[in-house]
Amino acid sequence: MLSIQPIVEPPSDGDIILPFVGKNAVLPLRLPPDVLFTRTQIAQEFGDYNREIPVGYWNQTPCYTIQLLEHQINALEHLTGSLYTLLGRVSDHVFNAFGRGLQLHHWWRDHRFCGRCGQTTELRDQGKALGCVDCNYQAYPRLNPCIIVAVKKGAELLLAAAAGRQTGFYSTLAGFIEPGESAEAAVAREVREEVGIEICNTRFFRSQAWPFPSQLMLGFIADYASGELILDPAEIADAGWFERESLPQIPPMASISGQLIQAAFSE
Ligand SMILES: [Zn+2]
């Protein structure tokens, strides 16, 4: 399991390395799913690599993430896939470690140059910041807080199919928190905007890091208060009230949406 703290020792052969090719994670195909590459294995199997960023400690061992190139991958030896395809196929601990790794790569890619003066940046503050070599502006990895909410009406739950997505899932409503807004206010606003109803009794459920690309999902359960379903066609293709025995296809339990649906029915 990953512990997020600055790495204090120098790099060594036993370090754990989380490799990516672009946005795709690379795992050893022939090892058990929770056994990760060491620095020695990376050198033997891939040779050179780019952009090494400290991630933290994986079971007390220093852990870094790197970028490989497509031609270095051998489909007979390595499993590659987007983080979404890993969801439910590897443990939550491995998923979370790669999720943090991918967010750090996005952060580095988007902050190679200072947003204030345009000069190049370098890793600083034990790898926690990218600092400008000229004006010293420091950019930290950015999280985007989002709310996700299960709305209950008696024994029924509100589920919606998002417009423009091909997943076929009916899911709980979700949206980004706006600057200056509390999470609870965002819950009420998103529900009002997307399906036209008012809610009450909003209560916190749990949160989940969701690296697609850098959301922090804050899960809530709320009760229906008033209004009829009026869908925003830009956001919602279909929505309705569902009982537990007649659910459409819903997101997997590895996602907070799947967990919220189960928890809301179990209250
Ligand atoms: Zn600068």
Image (tube, grey):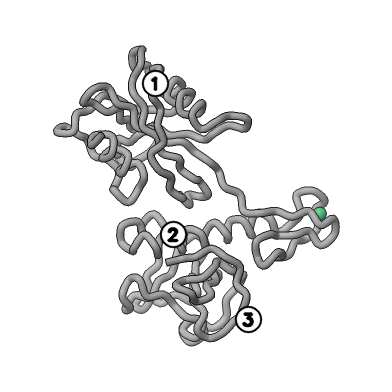
Circles 2 and 1 in contact, beta carbons < 8 Å: no
Q: Dot 2 corresponds to which residue? A: 96
The kind of residue on which mark 2 rests is: Asn
Q: Is residue 110 left or right of residue 262?
A: right
Mark 3 residue crowding within 10 angstroms, few (<14) / some (14–19) / many (20+):
few
User: What is the distance, in whole Å, between disc 3 and disc 1 at their CAs?
Assistant: 53 Å
Q: Residues within 10 Å of mark 2 (few under 14, many from 20)?
A: many
| Residue 87, horizontal then vertical, whole percent | 35, 56
Depicted 162 relative to depicted 136: above or below: above
Tell me the number on the disc at residue 10. 3
**In this rendering, which labeled residue sits more in front, label 2 or label 1?**
1
Q: Mark 3 belongs to which amino acid?
A: Pro
Q: Secondary structure at mark 2?
A: helix
Q: Quadrant of the C terminus?
A: top left
Q: Nearer the viewer, residue 235 or 69?
A: 235
Q: Quadrant of the N terminus?
A: bottom left
Q: Secondary structure at mark 3?
A: loop
Q: Give the labeled residue for mark 1.
A: 200
In primary-sequence order, the first of circles 2 and 1 is: 2
Q: Residue at x 41, y 75 (%)?
A: 36
Q: Measured from the top left, where is residue 188 in percent x and y? A: 46, 24
Marks 2 and 3, the one that precedes in the sequence: 3
Is 60 rendered above or below residue 168?
A: below
Which of the marked residues, 3 or 1, is nearer the chain's N terminus? Answer: 3
Q: Mark 1 Cα within 10 Å, few/some/many (few <14, many 20+)? A: some
Name which residue lies at 32% across and 36% down. Answer: 171
